[in-house]
Amino acid sequence: GAGVSQSPRYKVTKRGQDVALRCDPISGHVSLYWYRQALGQGPEFLTYFNYEAQQDKSGLPNDRFSAERPEGSISTLTIQRTEQRDSAMYRCASSHHPVTGQNTEAFFGQGTRLTVV
Amino acid sequence: AQSVAQPEDQVNVAEGNPLTVKCTYSVSGNPYLFWYVQYPNRGLQFLLKYITGDNLVKGSYGFEAEFNKSQTSFHLKKPSALVSDSALYFCAVRGMTTDSWGKLQFGAGTQVVVTP
């Protein structure tokens, strides 16, 4: 597609439920990133993929958070047993290969606003 | 570990005056540096980047940034600010070591307010 697409745009869920957030990157982009952003703060790194391989998941807060990108394109961020502190904007970004690609900047989607009640 | 510091929470400037948003970084090896802008209820938009070459890089909407290796800084500048430049600005760094090259680290952001 023309840009990074995230769905849903808004998600309200009850505490304890599982949620799955979807990211469809720019066509041809090798790298895909997940960030979490609190209001008025900078994006906080969660994890990233090159192709289907998860390269770094050091930013995932705990084992309730997981991500996958099975075919090297669309990615899903899953949060199990959601808690109120998980409420935030979740942003996905994609880029060409961060080292070998000529264009290394990441392009962001509009984000998914998650509210846990 | 890599990090980014944006020392000013907010920068106020009158329209037509020069705008500077400060950023310093810490990273192992040579850095890739980026500026992004976020308008209210919008996603992050890429403004410009420094990879290598000239220390002064030009980007979108008349913005430019100067890379200073000795001061580990990458300040964003615009010669004449517009009211429409009012937004939240983020500096970001990506390192080039094997444990940092995939991780784009953001600063906390600087709110720019341009008054008419």
Image (cartoon, coloured by chain):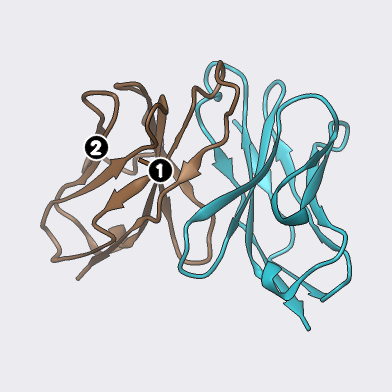
Chain colours: A brown, B cyan
Determine which quarter of the picture holds residue A75: top left
Q: Position of residue A97 (x, y in %)?
A: 49, 22
Q: Position of residue A94 (x, y in %)?
A: 43, 36
Q: Secondary structure at mark 2?
A: strand
B24 or B75: which is nearer to us? B75
Q: Which residue is mark 1?
A: A2
Quadrant containing the N terminus of chain B is: top right
Q: Is residue B101 left or right of residue B114?
A: left
Read off the chain for label 1.
A
Camera-side residue of B56 and A76: B56
- Does residue A8 sit above or below B16 in this rendering? above
The residue mark sitting in front, 1 or 2, is 1
Residue at figure coordinates x 80%, y 68% from the top left: B81
In space, the residues marked 1 and 2 are separated at their CA atoms by 27 Å
Pinpoint residue B104: horizontal percent, then vertical percent.
54, 36
What kind of residue is marked 2?
A: Ser
